[in-house]
Amino acid sequence: MSIVYLVAFLFGLTAEQCSSELIEDSSQSFMERMNTGKTSFVYFGNHVNPTIELFMEQLERSADALEDYGISVVKVNCSKDPIANYCTGEKLMTKAHLFRGSEVLRSFDIDTVFDVNAIVSHVLFSVLFNEVRYVHTPAELLRVENAAKQNSDIVVGHIPVLGLPEHRALMEAAFVYGTKYQFVQTTGSLVLRHMGVVDSSSSQARLWFLHCKGVSRQSDPCPSIPMRKPLKTINIHSFLQLMEAPLVTEAVVDPSEVDVVHIHLSVPVLYLFSQPQTQHLDRATAQTLALQLHGEAGVVLIHRDSPNVKTPLKYNAAYRLPQEDVKYFTLNSAEEVMKLFKEELVQEHKIEDEEGDEEHWSDLDILDDEVSESVYRDRDHMQDLESVTELTSDTFQSTVTQNDITVVLFYFKWDAVCMAFIQSYIEVADALEGVSGVELAAVDCGEWTDICGDQNVTSFPTVMIYRPMAAAQPYRGMLGTKSLHSFILLSLVSSPSHLSSSAEVMSFLEGDLYNKHVYLSAVRVLGLFSSTQDTGVTSFVEAARLLRGETILGLFAHKEAEQWVEGLSVNLPALLVSHGPGVPYKVYSIPSSSSPTDHVSLIKHVELDHFPELTVENLPWYLELGKPLLLLFIRKEDSTESNKSLAEIKRPLSSGQLDSFLPCWIHLGRTPVGRSILEKYLGFVPPLPALVISKLRTGGEVFLFPPERPLMAKNILQWIYDVEHGQEQPAGLIPDGKRGPPVPFFDFLAIMDQEAPTYATQRGPKMKNGGRESNREQKHEAPNQKQTPHPSPNPQAPRQHSEL
Amino acid sequence: MSVIQPLFRLLCVLSLATSGSGLHGRNKTVSHEYCVLGAGPAGLQMGYFLSRSQRDYIILERNTGPGSFFNIYPRHRKLISINKIYTGRRNKEFNLRHDWNSLLSDRPDLLFQRISRELYPNADDFPRYLSMFEKELGLKVKYGADIGRIQASEFYGNRGYILSDQNGVNYQCSVLLVSTGLWVPQQVDFLGSDLVEGYESIPTDPEEFKEQAVLILGKGNSAFETAQSILGRASRIHLYSPSPVRLAWQTHYVGDLRAVNNELLDTYQLKSLDGLVEGRLEDIAIVRRGKNGGKRRTAKKRSQTSTKGKEPLYLTLTELLDDQNGKNISEVTGQNLPGYHTDNFSLRQPYDRVIRCLGFHFNFSIFDGSARPPQSSGARGRLPGVTAWYEGRGTPNMFVLGTAAHSRDYRMSAGGFVHGFRYTVRAVHKILEQRYHNIAWPATILPISQLQSWILKRVNEASGPYQMFGVLGDIILLRGSYCEYLEEFPLQALPQLSALSGRPLSDHGLLVLVMQYGLNRTDTLGPGRAESEWTKAWRSNFLHPVLYYYNTLPTEKDMRQRPVGWPLPRPEAIHHMVEDFLTEWDQPISHSQPLRRFLEHCLQTDLRAFYAESCFLLSLTSRTPPLFCRQGYLRKQGIVGNSQLWQHAREAGLMADH
């Protein structure tokens, strides 16, 4: 039977074989391969590190899988066979290429094709590029549908995450059935909503079958049947078989003898018995029922007039559940059978539901906090605190006065946020090992509560910087490896640098002095004062002390300072800000009688970029400005298009036309979460680069620069004008609403009231002492009655007591 | 209250005036803002707090050294307060949970373990410790001042007290802190009570009890301690009192019989001639059987048997001693003994000694009329009645501290014991600071995002609420985005919170954190005694943290009508943190997450933590990012994490994958 064969084939596809099919090419065999015109997936490498080793393992496994599709998987050792074009360049090692003949169909980051499922799904998707349609929006899907009507049926797969087993299953099905059905792949949540999925937030993969072939008129919609089982190769296969099977099978034998595909696919079957006189009516009933049960059960119509049918007359219907015997019953109406069948099915659901219920309770035991859960999942992983000094009450004081800088982390072992951060802290400590004058230490506040109390630590985790003879300085930056690492290194730079000549100023801004710390920060802030006698100098020096670790500051208090503001409409004292060599300086005058904290906020303000790349680390500084964002998203791969669009936005920047906005950009390679932002804003990811206005603080509208319009300064300004004047429709809305508890409350009071009705209720006004204890006045027994010493069985405490 | 200061100056002037007159040289008058009566543990503890806040105070002590009670008691010299030095922990606060003898101070080394390393130390060590405490902290104690009389006096409408000592010196005090303890032996008046020896004066040498039958009145620790010491010498020991014995390990009340004293339970239950009997003390009489009372058939051997030693003592009932006219008979005969009427009456055999071990009561006698606090309604009136903030009822500006203040939590918690009242003394001191010096109850200001970890910190180390379970609790005043955390407030005074603490309530409500034992309806050692499922935490039997959430401050009426057995009225919402075998309430699934969800309900906000990347996404795609992001990430203090952690979070489906 062809079904059996197909199943075997599909199983064959997924089963891994023992012998490896991975081919290693020399330069010669590679050249030959290029000429064959066959499809091959090639990885060029020159050495092996742990990441590559893992990848090679997966590559090997994919070789076996892809062989079934006639695709060779090849590796080339570049150190042996340096093949031109591929064995050179930065992308070597991190890329794999899909060839058809000598033509590169697509290149993949090995991050994308991280395992066998990802390799197979991405390679097949590329190979099937013309067969499988990729749609974003319902409109695109409708176009595909219209084209397919009366022609072929459509299989729509919604794959929220590419490269996972579900994606592979869909691609493998597309490879096998691609000529028979039109395959459609989508990732967008809009299509999901279009298909009638209410809860579009779930990341479950889904599949639908659209019966377009049988549509009689072009204007009719294609009936769609969802697949209810998880997206796996075998489930897709049986689902497609079900979709192919005739709605109603007619038979002339007893139910147990009827062989329909449903039985093989473990799907329930409904048998209806038909009398010759009511044959038409019975057939119609069967059709109706079959339509309602499509995809969930098969329907068989058995003609009673055949002598082979021996079922007693009192029954007019039967059903058979998978792996069970036929059960007969008497059917009075179609509704009844639906009810029964749905109930049978529902029963299954019910069981599932009950399980679901239990799960609901055990759900309470699933951590729903990403930090807690990730730390919890990591609980088996011992933290190696070797590079961090664990302080105790005895060692704390001596340690923090010993080094130029002692960094101390105050943490709780049981606090997930602390334990998440401590990993970063250890990374910093490891990175700083060998840097003299710096020591990283930690205090477990669960044990050394006295130290943490003395140091006034009330927030966890807290990082403090101790220097001998100076007050402790709290670290106020991001609690991450990169930020803390550079903070500590910057803390070692004297602040401010006292500059004594214009030459030194030059060196500070772009010369040797600059280069010394260029790897820490590109920004330099210089305080310009006409003389050291200037009253502002002390404030500036104090501010510089407060900003240690955050900003590299220089101080030039000299008569030559005037030269640096010459020709600018700024008077001394002034701040000069440089964002790196080649970038024009900016100069700001310092208001007289500024306090150190005024200085700090001024410096923090002038340091900000005017067209920043938003990153996870720097966003808070820019959001503080409270302006609507003019936000450009650019793609991972650096392209001239991206650079051009950046330049186009920069153009009107200097003229102040964008002052009411914060012009900024997100690089999806460095900040991949940007993709999710676009999806949240628009419901889909438009072609990149994409420019949006996000009115985060005012109204919450999001506007998308029309993708078809060229990203030119002129167009951008026009578009902004239109947006400002209500000429543009918002493309999305940023939700505003109270963020309530994420899960329903577990109400102990309600449970008490139910399980112990009076336990939690207030007493009435008259009840005294609650009367919980019965009055156990100890009556002395009359002498003619027995008095026995009675041990007290009841530990319940009587009120009277004679001892203290 | 600055009224106090001028009042003081006035008092000083007055005292100068009186002493200056010189006519009655002995009638010296000294004035102090605070007078602490008694240099026991409670007095010294209060002295420490007064000295730390630099108040004008004096501690008056009639003896020559501190803690003189402990020079005599317990008679058999074994303290039963736990001195557990090795806890496996270095957390000083946590270790106080298992150190029942030390007083509180800011000196980390001023602990009882410096004096003794015994789990049950010798009683002599305690006065030594107190003496060290007093000296090292330089507390102002006046020894040898025996206050015989306390009078109330009014100055400009403020109640003060005048204390007179044996030398005629008068101490004028604006605030009187009574920490005299309980030391007057409790006696019950019955016929023959003069034949009874007292715990305070019995010999402690077991040899003195050799081959003697002993009846002990009382079933508390002193009774059992006495029984235990003579167990190897006495022929038979019976314990008699109204209530059945109550075991501390069943009631969780440390005043009940401690297992360290309970050997007699063994000898009773193994039928080794000892026993316990219940009956009223007022109904009994202790008598000697008259020499001529019984009818004797042979009087020959009389001289041989009973001339030596004392006549044996019989326990009988008053009603058997009355003759027809209701008058006491002069001679006791066999008919006057219960054994004559009930042949197997359990206490029919005579005793060589009857010992009274009935505890002590407060010395009310030194207080003059209006200065005298009323007798407590509970504890058989042996204690002074006090308000929820330990001020004498009807005696304003007089507070009762230490064991004498136990009426608030008598038979409930540890307020009658050093390890409990050291915390109530601290609470009273904070109330004094607010009332007389306008210094509000100390509070830690916390952003709401830090509240959960602060609660967990307290739950896992705080000794005050742990020792004074059900009595002292932490109060969290919610103020929107932040809260004020007040430690160890007396729960019964909750309706007066604002006045007593100087901290007003906002309309965000408040949380109260209390440590509680549970319903205790199961066998203490039987199956099902422990609960491990957090969803059934309210059925926890062992000490566990409970949080109460109120929209508004409960009223006095709410407090009076609170559910039976509860320390507080029914709240808006309650959360029990499931009891823990190790008393470590720090596990993510059973402790932290349920607590977080409770707080989320009370605050109606999402309190989950997020990595910086998630905060980045939420800050750009929502106009109200979660609190954790607002109070952390958006203040530039985001938790970045690393790829491994993100991977875990993504696999769990909690973090967006891109």
Image (cartoon, coloured by chain):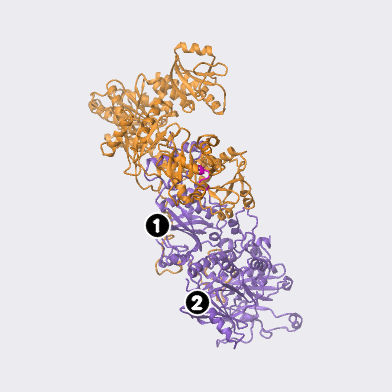
Judging from the image, what secondary structure is the residue with disc 2 in?
helix
Nearest the viewer among B511 and B363 is B511
Rendering coords of residue B417 (x, y %): 58, 66
Colour assigned to chain A in the rendering is: orange
Q: Nearer the viewer, mark 2 or mark 1?
A: 2
- The residue identified by callout 2 is B7
- Colour purple maps to chain: B
Nearest the viewer among A576 and B137 is A576
Nearest the viewer among A201 and B81 is A201
Mark sitting earlier along the chain (2/1): 2
- The residue identified by callout 1 is B508
Q: Which residues are magenta?
A: A545-558
**Would residue A3 be seen by someone viewing this image from the given angle?**
no
**Residue drawn 63% across the image and 83% down it:** B167
What residue type is disc 1 on? Answer: His
Q: Is residue A163 above or below residue B325?
A: above
Judging from the image, what secondary structure is the residue with disc 1 in?
loop
**Residue drawn 39% across the image and 28% down it:** A642
Rendering coords of residue A275 (x, y %): 26, 27
Quarter assignment of residue A292: top left
Q: Are marks 2 and 1 on the same chain?
A: yes
